[in-house]
Image: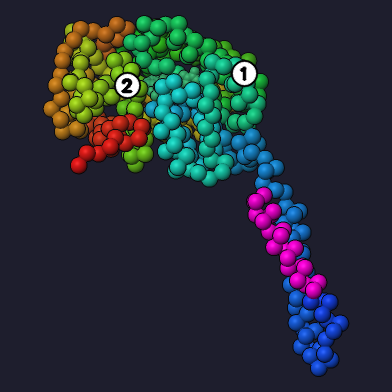
């Protein structure tokens, strides 16, 4: 706009100059031409007047460079959500869903584990001003966090950012407490200081530890058995204590094991190669099917379960992000909602492997190993509270179908979010 105003001015000036030269020639006019010529001159004068008026209107319009940043002001009818960890697996899917539902989204991520490629996909899909902005920042950096909150008008925060590998947490516990617990405290402080009152928090079934009774309800006691689960439980406690003193609207969602990807194929799960050894079962399964790793290592076959392998509740990421949108919609001041987000059905690792073979069509090589430290035998949810209160139910409960969707993305992105590998013909 600034450019167009400055480009228009010389054009208008040229026209007004030509008008003044015509008005000079008016005095020299032959009387016989007077009527026709005066009509001609009048139309030129009229044109000049219109152009002058047009020019004045344009100059009166505020130039674009002074237009306020849409992310920095609240706008009636627009909900601006801060998605921390939005370059990661679940956060990027949540951002996509929010954008599809017309929310305004700011993603903050330090890209320690997420992918700039996921951000690019989102930016390509939603290029319009005021829809999506990405801020590269570390949530452990108090100055950066405070600045982000001070400069943006958030209505709500979905706090996904975290290191999130059980095995890694047993090796690097301090990293987990700092990244998960200390950073959540930082986000809460920034929310309080900047009057942001709605928080949707990514928690985990790992906060329950290994309860004796299945399924797990929200009332099941929380005795986490690894630093990851403990760090998340501490964050929950901090949030709950703080919420008692404020009118915050809080939703704590305890996810079970997340699988799948966007059915439209925009996004997928693409952990860093160096995290593969700690990785989740779906990633390992696809890597084995793609031939990136020689086979799948099933850790632990002597658990007290029907086939000796661990039992988990696998929730499709599309259902999970739907739970977030419903939680955001139902969040109320002075209220805390705590919900399990799972299917309610436990599946063994062996069952998962069979579903993976079916989805990929590859006869994956399986190696059976001893247990992984920090793992628990059986975990599955009772999702009746979230069914009842948020009207949410998992829709995508066919393991093989969820894996098929994810497999399509994996096949189309053999190099993850990086530039596609050169094809040899
Ligand atoms: N994947 C699961 O099965 C599962 C299950 C239960 C809970 N969760 C929770 O869901 C959330 C998202 O998990 P995910 O699987 O998408 O993990 P992910 O690693 O794919 O994404 C996490 C994102 O957070 C970012 N991040 C980490 N530390 C950061 C920091 N200090 N500052 C800014 N950004 C930072 C990473 O770069 C990454 O993009 C986590 O809180 C995790 O604990 C995940």
282 w.r.t. 216: above or below: below
Side of 276 relative to 301 (left or right): right
View quadrant of ligand 1? top left
Q: Secondary structure at mark 2?
A: helix
| Residue 142 left/right relative to 41 | left
> How far across and down, in percent of the image, does residue 245 sit?
63, 15
Query: Does the beta carbon at disc 2 come under 8 Å from ligand 1?
Result: no
Give the Cα separation between the discs numbered 2 and 1. 31 Å
Whole-percent x, y for residue 251 in the image? 50, 24
Q: Residue 143's mark?
A: 1
Crowd band around label 1 with a 10 angstrom C-alpha radius: few (<14), some (14–19), many (20+): few
Q: Nearer the viewer, residue 363 or 26?
A: 26
Query: In this view of the protein, which residue sits in the foreground, 40 or 101?
Result: 40
In this image, 121 relative to 312: left or right?
right
Question: Could you classify mark 2 by the number of other residues whose Cα lies within 10 Å: few (under 14), some (14-19), or many (20 or more)?
Answer: few
Residue at x-position 19% and y-position 19%: 296
Q: Nearer the viewer, mark 2 or mark 1?
A: 2
Residue 282 makes an appearance in the image: yes
Is residue 303 something that shows in the picture?
A: no
Task: Determine which quarter of the picture holds residue 5.
Answer: bottom right
Image coords of residue 66 (percent x, y):
70, 42
In the image, residue 283 above or below residue 95: above
- Which mark identifies residue 336? none
| Magenta residue span | 1-21
Residue nearest the viewer, comparing 66 with 265: 66
Magenta stretch: includes residue 230: no
């Amino acid at each position: 706009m600034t450019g167009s105003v400055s480009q228009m001015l010389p054009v208008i000036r040229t026209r007004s100059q030509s008008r003044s030269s015509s008005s000079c020639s008016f005095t020299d006019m032959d009387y016989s031409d007077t009527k026709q010529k005066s009509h001609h001159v009048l139309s030129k004068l009229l044109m000049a007047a219109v152009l002058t008026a047009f020019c004045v209107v344009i100059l009166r319009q505020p130039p674009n460079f002074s237009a306020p940043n849409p992310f920095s002001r609240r706008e009636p009818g627009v909900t601006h959500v801060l998605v921390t960890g939005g370059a990661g697996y679940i956060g990027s899917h949540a951002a996509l869903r929010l954008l599809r539902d017309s929310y305004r989204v700011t993603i903050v991520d330090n890209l320690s584990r997420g992918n700039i490629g996921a951000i690019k996909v989102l930016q390509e899909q939603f290029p319009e001003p005021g829809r999506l902005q990405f801020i590269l920042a570390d949530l452990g950096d108090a100055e950066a966090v405070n600045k982000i909150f001070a400069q943006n008008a958030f209505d709500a925060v979905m706090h996904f950012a975290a290191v999130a590998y059980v095995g890694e947490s047993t090796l690097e516990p301090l990293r987990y407490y700092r990244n998960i617990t200390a950073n959540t405290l930082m986000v809460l402080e920034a929310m309080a200081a900047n009057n942001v009152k709605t928080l949707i928090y990514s928690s985990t079934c790992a906060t329950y530890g290994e309860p004796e009774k299945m399924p797990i309800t929200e009332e099941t006691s929380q005795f986490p058995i690894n630093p990851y689960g403990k760090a998340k439980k501490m964050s929950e406690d901090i949030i709950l204590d703080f919420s008692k003193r404020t009118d915050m609207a809080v939703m704590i969602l305890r996810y079970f094991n997340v699988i799948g990807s966007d059915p439209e194929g925009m996004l997928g799960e693409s952990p860093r190669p160096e995290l593969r050894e700690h990785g989740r079962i779906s990633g390992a399964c696809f890597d084995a099917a793609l031939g990136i790793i020689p086979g799948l290592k099933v850790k632990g076959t002597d658990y007290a379960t029907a086939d000796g392998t661990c039992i988990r509740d696998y929730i499709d990421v599309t259902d999970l992000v739907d739970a977030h949108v419903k939680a955001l919609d139902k969040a109320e001041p002075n209220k805390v909602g705590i919900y399990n987000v799972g299917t309610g059905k436990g599946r063994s690792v062996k069952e998962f492997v069979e579903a993976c073979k079916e989805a990929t069509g590859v006869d994956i090589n399986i190696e059976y190993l001893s247990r992984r430290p920090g793992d628990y035998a059986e975990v599955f949810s009772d999702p009746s509270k979230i069914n009842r209160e948020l009207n949410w139910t998992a829709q995508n409960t066919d393991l093989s179908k969820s894996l098929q969707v994810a497999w399509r993305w994996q096949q189309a992105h053999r190099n993850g979010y990086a530039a596609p590998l050169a094809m040899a013909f």
